[in-house]
Image (cartoon, rainbow, N blue to C red):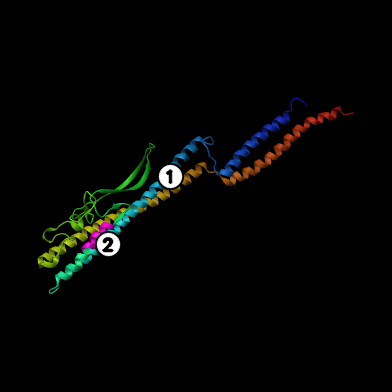
Amino acid sequence: MTSILTNVAAMSALQTLRSINGSLEETQSRVSSGYRVAEAKDNAAYWSIATTMRSDNKALSAVSDALGLGAAKVDTAYSAMDSAIDIVSEIKAKIVAATEKGVDKTKVQDEIAQLQQQLLSVAQSASFSGENWVAGNTTKSVVSSFVRDANGQVSVQTTEYFLDDSTSGNVLFGMTTTGAIDTATGIIGTSSGSVGSIFSMDITSFSDSDINLALTTVENGLSALTKAGSQLGSISTRIDLQESFVSNLSDSIDSGVGRLVDADMEEESSKLTALQTQQQLAIQSLSIANNSAQNVLTLFKG
């Protein structure tokens, strides 16, 4: 039955066109934004997870920057410790040379004095971003990781390094409460009995037994410096490993979030083409349905 009051065919075609237009709008949005889940209304659960993980990834980026800063501090300290080992080795060689009969100990001491001052210079200059890891007696720390536990609680983990200014510790010198280098403490500054410290010893009037004690003091200092350098090297290795892990973790989070919310562009492109074709057919269908009522006029023509 054809009715001029109710065009059922046109209503059906219009509903189909509206549905196709809605799907087409959604697909166009995915193609233009690249997201399958761009807002909470698209998929509340996935959107919530993705938002949280993006936030964590920003925190990981900050951790990566902090690790870089920590690595620079440790590398500076290690370079200073390595230089100190070379200098103390030179002092050892000078003392050995002083054991030779007929050697002018005064001239040897002049050379040793220059090396001693160089040790102080190394300790004073081994600072990065206001922190000195080869002079002092405090605990230093570097950010190592950002952690979210099973309960959703977040925390920042740090790696600590205690500066020990004893003669068998891990710093060249200690530091006073005012922040000045304390040349009477640390591996280089702590006195070793009658011969003094590596920094203060003066071999000008040393006897043969004193020379031997001085050699023992220097050898013990070298052993402590080597141990301290090893500790710094271990921390540097851990920081490097952590930097690599943080970088890989950040990439994994990006990949995981992408799987949740990114649009499949090949699929969306194919769908867009199909919907555009369906839209054209629906428009033609609606046009045909609307024109069907006009055919009733032919019944009244003579």
Q: Quadrant of the C terminus?
A: top right
Residue 229, quarter of picture: bottom left
The disc at residue 116 is none
Tell which of 298 and 172 is nearer to you. Answer: 172
- What residue is shown with label 1? 58
The percent coordinates of residue 241 (x first, y second) are 36, 52
Tell which of 202 and 140 is nearer to you. Answer: 202
In the displayed structure, 160 sits above or below 11; it is below
The amino acid marked with disc number 1 is: Lys
Q: Quadrant of the N terminus?
A: top right
The percent coordinates of residue 190 (x first, y second) are 17, 56
**Residue at position x 64%, y 34% from top?**
19
Q: Residue furthest bottom?
A: 102
Q: Is residue 119 magenta?
A: yes
Position of 19 with respect to 211 (left or right) is right
In the displayed structure, 224 sits above or below 27; it is below
Q: Secondary structure at mark 2?
A: helix
Residue 32, quarter of picture: top right
The 10 Å Cα crowd at callout 1, few under 14, some 14 to 19, many 20 or more, is few
The 10 Å Cα crowd at callout 2, few under 14, some 14 to 19, many 20 or more, is some
- Magenta: main secondary structure equals helix
In the displayed structure, 160 sits above or below 114; it is above
Q: CA distance from mark 1 to mark 2?
A: 38 Å
Q: Is residue 72 magenta?
A: no
The percent coordinates of residue 234 (x first, y second) are 30, 54
- What residue is shown with label 2? 83
Who comes first in sequence, dot 1 or dot 2? 1
Tell which of 172 and 46 is nearer to you. Answer: 172
Residue numbers of the magenta segment? 116-125
**Numbered disc total:** 2
